[in-house]
Image (tube, rainbow, N blue to C red):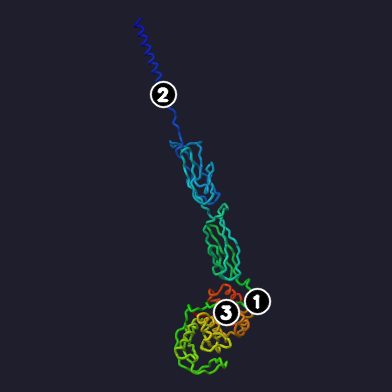
Amino acid sequence: MKNRRVRDITVTAVFVGVLVAACSGDASTEPPPPPVVVPTTVTVSPPLAALAALGETVQLTAMVNDQNGNAMTGVTVTWSSSKASVVLVNATGLVMAVDNGQATIAAAAGTASGTAAMTVEQVPANMSVRPDTLGFFGALGDTATVVATILDANGHEIESASVEWRSTDIAVVTVTDGLVTSVGNGAAEVSATAGVASASAAVTVDECLRYLPNEDGTVLPETVWLTPSIITAADTSALESVSFAGRGTRQFWDEEAWQWVALDSLWLFNVRFGQRDGVTEFQVHPQFDGLPAARAQVEKYALPAGRLPRALVRDLNEVEISVAENRKGWGVVNASRGHGFHVFTHHAEQYLATHIEEIMLHEGGHVSLDHEHLSSTGWKSAQEKDGTFITGFARDHPDSEDLAESIWAYFVARYRPDRVTREHLRAIRCGIPHRLAYFDSLDLEMWPF
């Protein structure tokens, strides 16, 4: 009985062992659970984009991959903009331009994210200018501003666009950054260009359209005394030489007798000017004591005479210098017998530093132009067509002073326009245009100007 019990225990143990072994073998054959996949990389397409207009959009897409490089679907992606003031992005990745600049769009899935670079730079597509018509009817040199408005393709204004301005005729108007300046009478266009966009304004310049002379029929209040800046000491003098020629007798104006007399013992000098042929004789009154004093007077007045244009010293054969005061108020320098100047030093001395050249301009008209043109048909016609006079002095003496007054104005308008005000220049051009045209027709030699 004892042995049988042992045997039963042994059999039982073996059975249990077999059973355990069988159970262990079944557990080792079950597959392990699948690994958890997570978003690891996010790729945004396109990786960069440039938007040329505010309101323009671009659709971005995000590809999400797991740790094994496999594409993931159905993953929630969150979109964001680094600068909402530049670009906005919605929940689907649609990006819209808001303002010029740069920003980054980010797409996030879990802890993974990707980005795309966005640039917004408005590109000109359309342009307009205002005003689109412009008229200048005042003095040349007047200005006006033309404003250009540049739009992108969606109609949004571009505030910082670079604009190129151009005038089709710079002899009529010039333009700089939209500032238009009238230069000469005529018509032109001012254009603005930004990229492929352009627009233009039509410009008309007519300085005389609305010009009205003075109520008394004059143009300027005066000529000689208008300004001392027409010719100045800074301008080159064509005086070449002064040489003493002895003493002699000449016809000389006598203030006491109020007539021309033969005066002895005049100091005589030969003066050469670069702008005229031949010699101009300077005759100095014997009241100037001694040769040095007489020569000093010659040099004093020859220097400004040498600054006159050639046409006004062409017939300047003599210059008489008198110390006497001009009792009749003839002035500082007068035309002398149709072929010279008479200088009254009592008056002239105070004007040497200011108006002496302006005075000589006027008198040069008498000396070199009166005898040929005062009675000419062309001059008379120009007076009639203008219907005005440059000054009251010219109006009161149309047959003797109008030409000399007008040649002064002509010189200013054609050769020294920058030395008078724009309004005075306009008055000359618009008040006596036919006289100016008459002088133009003469083809006067105005060297050195």
Whichever of labels 1 and 3 marks the residue nearer the N terminus, that label is 1
Q: Residue at x 62, y 72 (%)?
A: 211
Q: Say what amino acid the circle numbered 3 marks.
A: Thr
Q: Which mark is residue 223?
A: 3
- Residue 367: % across, % down: 55, 86
Distance of label 1 from label 2 (alpha carbons): 124 Å
Farthest residue toward the right? 215
Residue at image mark 1: 215
Q: Is residue 324 visible?
A: yes
Label 1: few (<14), some (14–19) or many (≥20) C-alpha neighbours in 10 Å: few
Assess whether mark 3 and mark 1 are in contact (beta carbons under 8 angstroms).
Answer: no
- Residue 38: % across, % down: 46, 35
Residue 244 or residue 67, whichever sits in front: 244
Label 3: few (<14), some (14–19) or many (≥20) C-alpha neighbours in 10 Å: many
Q: Which mark is residue 29?
A: 2
Q: Say what amino acid the circle numbered 2 marks.
A: Thr
In this view, the mark in front (3 or 2): 3
Q: Residue at x 50, y 47 (%)?
A: 83
Q: Is residue 12 above or below residue 77?
A: above
Assess whether mark 2 and mark 1 are in contact (beta carbons under 8 angstroms).
Answer: no
Farthest residue toward the left? 3
Label 1 sits on a secondary structure element that is loop
Whichever of labels 3 and 2 marks the residue nearer the N terminus, that label is 2
